[in-house]
Structure formats: C-alpha cells, structure tokens
C-alpha cells in the first residue's frame, strides 16, 4: 500500500512541476512582451497573465497536501495552516473560473467588433479588465471567507462520515456547518461564469466558421487547402473551453460523491486532486501553441540547427 501511495505521490510531483513550469514560461513570455516589445502587447495579454499567475498559485495549494500525504507525512498542517491553505486554494480555483470566463468574453467581443453594433463595446472592453480582476478577487474572498471558520486539522488519515476532508483537513457534516444557501451561492457563481464562458465560446466558433465560409471562395485552390488563421483560433478556443469543461465537470462529480461517502478512500481523493489540478496544468500548453514569440524562437532555433548540420556535413 505504501508503494502504491508513493507512485501517486511521484505522479503528483510530476504534475506539479509540469504545470508550474508551463505557466511560468507563459508568464515570462508575456512579461518579455510587456517590457522588451511593448508594441506587440495586447489588452488580452493582461487576462492571460492573470490566468497564469492564478494557476501558479493554485497548483501547489492543490497538490502539495496530497503529495505529502502520499509519502506518509503526518501533521503537515495544523488548524491555522489548514484554514489558510484551503481558503487560498478555493479562492484561486474560483479566480481561475472567473478569469477563463473573462478571457472567453473578451475574445468574443474582439471577434464580434467587425459588426457595427459591437464597435463601441470593443473600445470600452479593455477598460473593464482590471476592474474585473478586482471584482473577481473581492467576490471569491467574500464567498470563501466562511471556509476559515469551518475547517479543522485532522488528527489521523482515517475519516468516517460525510463532509469535506483530505489527509490534513476536514469539516463537519453539511447540515451543521454549511447551509444550503451557501451551496446555492457557490453553484450560482459557477453556473453564471461557466454558462457565460461556454456561450461566448460557441458564439466565437460560429462567427469564425461563417467568416471562413465567406472567404473560402475568394482564395485560390492552393490557398484554400491551407489551414486558415481563423481555424487555428477556433481550435484553440475549442480546446481551452473543452479542457475546462471536462476537468470542471469531472472534478465536481467526483467531489460530490467523495463528500457524501461514509468512508473516505485515499485513491479517490488523489484522483479528485489530479482532476482539480488538471486544467491549470494543461492550460498554459494550449495557450503556448499560439504564442508568436515562442513560435519565432522555435523557428529560429530550427534554422540554426539546420544551418549547423549543413556546415558540419559540408565540412
């Protein structure tokens, strides 16, 4: 059993390293654009930077408790540490949902701005980015402030009874600790932002497809066979939204099941943890595919490698 737990621990460490490195690389690229090439920066870069920073904060908060528990570390968190870690984890998870939704809405406004009725909205949308960040932080801090009072550190790894729990933290039964009004607030917050994100993403896909249909007959046969730029944007949007919806739904379904089962299963807890950290881990690599700076750097390195190989062959 200890060997199996260690395997899970190694997997979680790999996921943590991959996710943090991917988000850090993406953050550095946006920072490089901001400081070195400011003429290339776009308003949407601020949203992407905020999303990557939230992911960097969320990943250790999500994975570290389960990593330590997988290797048998007991009493890793006391009451204060438990409250702080779980509060920050919930806040950053909520910020990830809100920021992804904002990203989808902003892209939809940008694409729709070719239509006259959307032009005025595009001119003001960039002014709403930082006030939106402030609103997201206030909203999620206010929602999850109650977590501080409800969680306590556990004295052992074995917990029996329904309620939230992991290796180091637990809450009491839902009827005595969390009201159904609070559950409704959480569900309403998630539903609003998820529905907004999915609907705007579908709207973008529709606009891009219509644009592709209108312009396809204008291209020459050779150009028509090449993938259009709007198709690449469509694929990125679909992948990002599909990735979020998959991990979000999977994590919530298993979390609700884990919440209500009487005897907590450690393997199920680890799977819930992996799914919870899935979107922050995969997200930067979906966005890196369309990063121009990384694409140019990769192309330059490929040219240098080809040139050096030719010189070595000719020499």
Image: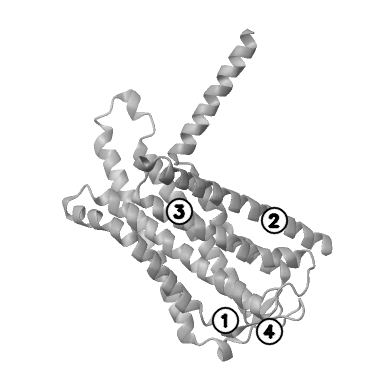
Task: Give the image location of residue 38, x and y in percent.
Answer: 37, 43
Decide: few, some or many residues near mark 3? Use Cα within 10 Å; few <14, some 14-19, many ≥20: some
Labels 4, 2: front one: 2
Mark 4 or mark 2: whose residue is earlier in sequence: 2
- Residue at left offset 46%, top offset 73%: 140
Labels 1, 4: front one: 1
Alpha carbon separation for disc pair 1 and 4: 21 Å
Q: Which residue lies under the disc numbered 4?
A: 161
Locate residue 127 relative to residue 36 in the image: left or right: left
Residue 25, which numbered label? none
Name, please, the residue furthest toward the left.
116
Give residue 271's quadrant in the image. bottom right
Q: Secondary structure at mark 4?
A: loop
Alpha carbon separation for disc pair 4 and 2: 29 Å
Name, please, the residue furthest toward the top.
315
Q: Secondary structure at mark 1?
A: helix
Q: Which residue lies under the disc numbered 2?
A: 13
């Amino acid at each position: 059993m200890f060997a199996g737990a260690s395997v899970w621990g190694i997997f979680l460490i790999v996921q943590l390293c991959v996710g943090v490195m991917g988000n850090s690389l993406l953050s550095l690229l946006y920072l490089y654009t901001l400081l070195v090439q400011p003429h290339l920066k776009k308003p949407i870069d601020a949203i992407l930077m905020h999303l990557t920073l939230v992911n960097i904060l969320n990943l250790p908060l999500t994975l570290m408790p389960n990593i330590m528990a997988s290797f048998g570390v007991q009493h890793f968190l006391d009451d204060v540490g438990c409250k702080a870690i779980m509060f920050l984890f919930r806040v950053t998870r909520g910020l990830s949902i809100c920021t992804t939704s904002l990203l989808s809405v902003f892209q939809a406004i940008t694409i729709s701005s070719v239509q006259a009725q959307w032009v005025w909205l595009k001119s003001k949308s960039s002014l709403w980015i930082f006030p939106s960040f402030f609103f997201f932080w206030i909203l999620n801090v206010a929602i999850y402030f109650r977590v501080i009072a409800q969680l306590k550190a556990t004295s052992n790894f074995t917990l029996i009874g329904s309620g939230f729990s992991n290796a180091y933290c637990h809450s009491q039964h839902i009827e005595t600790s969390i009201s159904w009004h609070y559950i409704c607030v959480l569900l309403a917050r998630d539903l609003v932002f998820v529905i907004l994100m999915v609907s705007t993403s579908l709207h973008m896909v529709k606009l891009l497809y219509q644009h592709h249909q209108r312009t396809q007959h204008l291209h020459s046969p050779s150009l028509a066979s090449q993938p259009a730029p709007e198709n690449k944007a469509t694929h990125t949007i679909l992948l990002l939204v599909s990735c979020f919806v998959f991990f979000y739904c999977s994590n919530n379904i298993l979390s609700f099941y884990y919440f209500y089962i009487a005897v907590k299963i450690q393997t199920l807890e680890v799977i819930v943890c992996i799914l919870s950290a899935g979107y922050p881990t995969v997200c930067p690599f979906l966005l890196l595919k369309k990063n121009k700076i990384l694409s140019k750097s990769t192309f330059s390195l490929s040219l240098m490698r080809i040139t050096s190989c030719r010189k070595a062959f000719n020499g």
